[in-house]
Amino acid sequence: MNMPKNQSSDSLVFAVDLGGTHLRVALVDDTGKIVRQLKQETPHGESGNCIVNALANVAAEWSGEKQRVVAVSIMVPGAVDSDKAVVLQAPNLPSLVNFGLKAALQQRLGWPVFLENDANAAAVGDMWLGAARGCRDVMSVTLGTGVGGGLILDGKLWRGLHGSAGEIGHTTVDPFSGLKCKCGNTGCLELFASATAIVRMTRENLSLFPESSLKDGELTAKRVYEAGRAGDELALAVFKRFGMYLGIGLANLINLIDPQIIVITGGAANGWDLFSSEMYRQVEERAFRSISQQVKIARAECGDNAGLLGAARLAQTALTELS
Ligand SMILES: [Zn+2]
């Protein structure tokens, strides 16, 4: 990538991961090195100004690096209009919806502001410095509380007309399940291959496995995973089901996109050793054989930082194009 005219080689992007629970900020240089980083609780107030104030405080604390910062790049768990830098929908950050975040931050901090959906930013981070390094057709699938997705075609983030491209979590994998998704559809992938789904599927099947160690106490995805590792049959059945639906979703994706690599990330991806064999089995059975034998399905390598790195990369690229 060529350096923009107005950007020196030691320029930094003020990258922000604006989660519903945690606010993470990092100063990222043009090689992807994180120079400074912090994590705090996301402030929740009536207005988005509380988030603007929190970010202005961080910028003031990091005044030593201020001269090197060339942009602010924010990722949010929701639908965004990246051109206008407006949050259109964010169930966990309602104060930001239609709030003038870009104008408010530009005024307070003085840097250009960019905004991106978190799964899209993670896809860019994975392509830049993660498991998809050097690949040009990439799908990133985040298995968390819900299921998110980011799509890169021919080396470029593909947002679609309304910024919602790559939303594999809300593609239908079982229309007859009777399970309603918060998006309004029934039988979405998110209802079977997320941390929330692990807990629900375990609870629903408790009566079929009276010997299960999960019959008492609070259910969490982590606890179900640990039970599965210890051989609990209910937990193993739940993760097999998880892998089956994920594999169905990925097989549909593979036939549609023909990607070079699918990167699997997010907290629920930690169950990989319990769900991946069924996932691979479904992909082999359902996707075009010529493609499914070559496509790589890999776990992410950037950990929690894929989104922050991707947000930084998107800002660097946008500044280059503007210069
Ligand atoms: Zn849905």
Image (cartoon, rainbow, N blue to C red):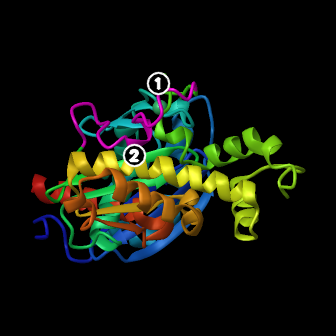
Q: Is residue 312 visible?
A: no
Identify residue for label 1: 185
Residue 237: image location, x then y, percent: 66, 54
Depth check: give the residue in front, 141 or 49.
141
Q: Which amino acid does label 2 sit on?
A: Gly
**CB under 8 Å between callouts 2 and 1?**
no
Magenta span includes 206: no
Identify residue for label 2: 249
Circle 2 packing at 10 Å, graded few (<14), some (14-19), many (20+), is: many
Q: Which residues are drawn in magenta? A: 159-178
- Label whose residue precedes the other's in the sequence (2 or 1): 1
Residue 242 appears left or right of 8: right
Q: Main secondary structure of the magenta part?
A: loop
Distance from disc 2 to disc 1, alpha carbons, whole Å, reads 15 Å
Name the quarter where the N terminus is drawn.
Answer: bottom left
Residue 313 appears left or right of 309: left
Name the quarter where the C terminus is drawn.
Answer: bottom left
Q: Which amino acid does label 1 sit on?
A: Asn
Residue 125: image location, x then y, percent: 34, 64
Instruction: Note whether ligand 1 is within 8 Å of mark 1.
Output: yes
Residue 297: image location, x then y, percent: 36, 65
Magenta span includes 173: yes
Q: Can residue 174 be seen in this view?
A: yes
Residue placed at 53% from the left, 45% from the top? 53
Badge 2 marks a residue whose secondary structure is helix
